[in-house]
Every structure is written in structure tokens, then in C-alpha cells.
Image (cartoon, rainbow, N blue to C red):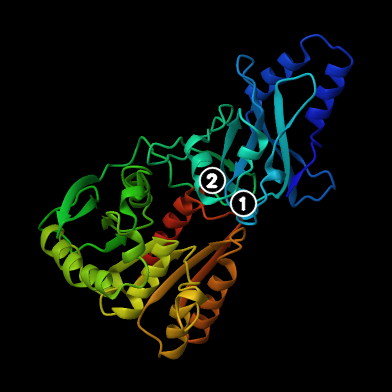
Amino acid sequence: MPSPVLSPALRALTDAVRTGTPRAEEEFWRHVETTGTPLVEPDPDGDPAHRLVTFLWRDDPDRPAGDVLALLHTVTDKDRHAGDLVPHLMTRLPGTGVWAIGHRLRADHRASYQFYVSHGPREEALRADRASWRRVLDLALPDPLNSDPPLPARDGRHPASVMALDEAPPQPWTARRADPARGTHRDEELDGRRITVHLPAGHRADGGPYPVVVLLDGEMWGPVLGVGDTLDNLLADGRIPPTVTLLVDSMGRRHEDLSCSDAFVDWLADRLLPWAARRHAADEDPERTVIAGQSAGGLTAAFAAYRRPERFGNVLAQSGSFWWPDDEASESGGEWLTGRYAACERLPVRFHLEVGLQEWMLLAQNRRLRDVLRERGYDLTYEEFNGGHDYACWRGGLASGLAGLLGRP
């Protein structure tokens, strides 16, 4: 949770400014530029499992901010859903241009974050309705003092910075490397839907058959996040075999297609997979076919295996929206798909599920599906990461999930 400014470094700056130490703020920023942000210091209570993490924003002297909101992915969203953004207002240190807010976080936390700089009335910055929040996200900025690679965004928004504390799980396959042989990307179309096909290095049309991954929300994973680098790295390290990956564009139909849609799943099974087999030598064996998705895509991945297990033998579901449908939308109540898996015999499907500990709207539902699958005897790996509903976490989990599902017989 956000805390008062407790950072020893900030206390020292406050004391120096108060006593008139020359160039105190200038020396502080010089130190911060060297060490990078956010500031990470020992837990004030002495707990070795936690860190005091202080986010900093440097005011523009030509246009001083009225307020600054620190947007820590999912952590801030939880309070926004509750209608209260006050805990995420940063504090300006008296006599300086330093805005700061501290969080006491577990040492394995990973999250993307941004800043919203407000020049209007405070009540405007604190509006939590959907339209106001979208405006905040449209204008939110990355941390200019964070030297780690940012998380790209789409729809004209600014990228986000990434905080990964020292005990966060490593993500060795996400960054572009100089050494691996490069696969190739092809922008194609099937039945009016855009498909980005990633072919592994050395792919031959007369080779294969190659294992196949169907990755939903392809418009995000391909042109924005560059998942081809991850696939190339996994192949170069021997963690997956040469694999054909089909990045399926949502085409503005995400809500319609990624909510347990029979028609969409049948299109994937009956049109997309046979097309990829003919055109790119993709394997049609369900044991060598993975369907992967996040959020509503995770729900759809699990539904695809339920509806068409003869085509989809492996599910990689990250932060799946297994609450679907909510109680008001269906007479049968929520968690429909979990109920279907509970009611049927075990299907020939393997699962890799993961969910973030900060995902207050999804954690319990993912655990319930995990329990049902275990009771039914499914081949299941399940992980909980200390983060939120966040591509900064998912890109690492996607890599490890693919390695687990494709890298074993």
C-alpha cells in the first residue's frame, strides 16, 4: 500500500533543504540519475521479504504540476475501482521539485507504472469514472529516470516503465538478443481476419510438421510487444522446438469472440489450423498444438480445449477471466467454464495456468479452476506471480509456459 514518504534518501534531502545545504536537490537528482528509479531501500520494519519502493517525479519548473498521480499497474486500479485515487497522489517535498510516493512491496513484485501530471483542479485528477480514467491513461507518461526497457503501448498511448524488484522471477527470453537466428514474420489474412504468422528460423514449406501455437490478441503480441524475439530466444536456447506461431488479430471483435464463443473456436479449429497445416506445414496433432491467451483470451483458450479437445491439446491461460459470465448476465451464474470442467470427464488436454497475486478480481476464480482440474486428474502446471493484470508479467509467463508445454514430450 502507498505510505508516507519514509525513504531515508528523501529524509536526508528534506533535512538538507531545510538547513540550507547548497545544491542539495541538484546533488539528489544527480545521484538518482546514476542509480535509476524507482528508489529501492530496505523495508522500514526490517522485513527481509519486503522493500520500500519510492517512485519519483521531477517537476518542470516552467510548468509546475498541481498534482501527480503514480499509476502502479493493478495496485492503483484496485483503488480506482473503489472510487478512491487519493492514496496514489504523490507528495511534493517542501522547497523542491521532487514529487514522491512510497510503497511497501514484497521483494518479488513486478509491475508496469506511469505518472499522470495534472495541471487542473485536484478533483479532476481524482475522478474515477471510466471516461476520466481513460483520459488519465491516454496522457500518462513513463518514468524518464528508469533506464530499463519500457513496455510498449498501443492506440497512441505512451509506453510504461517497468519495476522488477530483486526477487522477481527472471525473464531471460523477453528481450531481443544479437545472437539467435531470426524467424520470419508474415502478415496474412484468412476469411477477412488478419493473422501474423511467425515462422521459426530454418522453416521450410516442405519441412515439419511443426508444432503450432495459436496466440490470441495477436495485434498486441506481434507489432507492439515483438513476441517473435521471445520465440527466437526460446528456440535458440533449446527450450522449444521449431514452432509455427499464429497471432490472431481481434479485429475489433474481442468482446464477441473471447467470451466462450462457439463460432470463434470452431473457426480456429476448422479454418485456421487446417490453413496453417497446408500453408506452413503446421502439425494437426492436438498434442503439439497450444492455444494461449490472457484475460478474456485465457478464458477462450481454456474454452477452446473444452469445446474442441481433438484440436487443442495444450492450454496456456494467463490471468484467465474465469469469472465469466457475471451473475447479472446469466441465469446460471458466474464461472460457467469451471462448472463445465467439473461436470465432465477428464479430457486429453494439458494446462499451464498462471495468475497474479495482485489480481483481486481473478485470483480466487483461477484457484477454483485449478482445484477442479486437479480433482479431475489433469496434467496441470499452476503458478502465481506477484504482479497484476499486466503484460510486463505476462510476457515472461508466456515464455515459460510455452517452454513447459512444448519443451517436453
User: What amino acid is at disc 1?
Assistant: Arg
Q: What kind of element bears circle 1?
A: helix
Q: Which residue is mark 2?
A: 133
Q: What kind of element bears circle 2?
A: helix
Q: Quadrant of the C terminus?
A: bottom left
In terms of sequence position, does the residue under pointer 1 or pointer 2 come before the other?
1
Residue at figure coordinates x 51%, y 82% from the top left: 372
Q: Within 10 Å of the Cα at label 1, are there few (<14), some (14-19), or many (20+) other Cα atoms? A: many
Please say whether residue 38 is visible from this viewpoint. no
> Where is residue 145, by image quadrant?
top right
> Where is residue 39, by image quadrant?
top right
Q: Nearer the viewer, residue 211 or 17?
A: 17
User: What amino acid is at disc 2?
Assistant: Trp
Q: Position of residue 152 (x, y in %)?
A: 43, 39
Mark 1 to mark 2: distance in Å?
8 Å
Give left or right: position of 185 versus 168.
left
Q: Nearer the viewer, residue 183 or 368?
A: 368
Using the image, determine if residue 25 lies above or below residue 333: above
Q: Nearer the viewer, residue 205 or 36?
A: 36
Give left or right: position of 173 versus 73.
left
Using the image, determine if residue 25 lies above or below residue 282: above
Q: Within 10 Å of the Cα at label 2, are there few (<14), some (14-19), or many (20+) other Cα atoms? A: some
Of all residues, the one furthest to the right in this rendering is 19
Q: Position of residue 91 (x, y in %)?
A: 74, 33
Residue at figure coordinates x 32%, y 41% from the top left: 180
Residue at figure coordinates x 50%, y 34% from the top left: 139
Q: Position of residue 195 (x, y in %)?
A: 22, 54
Q: Nearer the viewer, residue 44 or 174?
A: 44
Residue at figure coordinates x 58%, y 60% from the top left: 359
Task: State if disc 2 and disc 1 touch (CB < 8 Å).
Answer: yes
Q: Which residue is mark 1?
A: 80
Please say whether residue 384 is visible from this viewpoint. yes
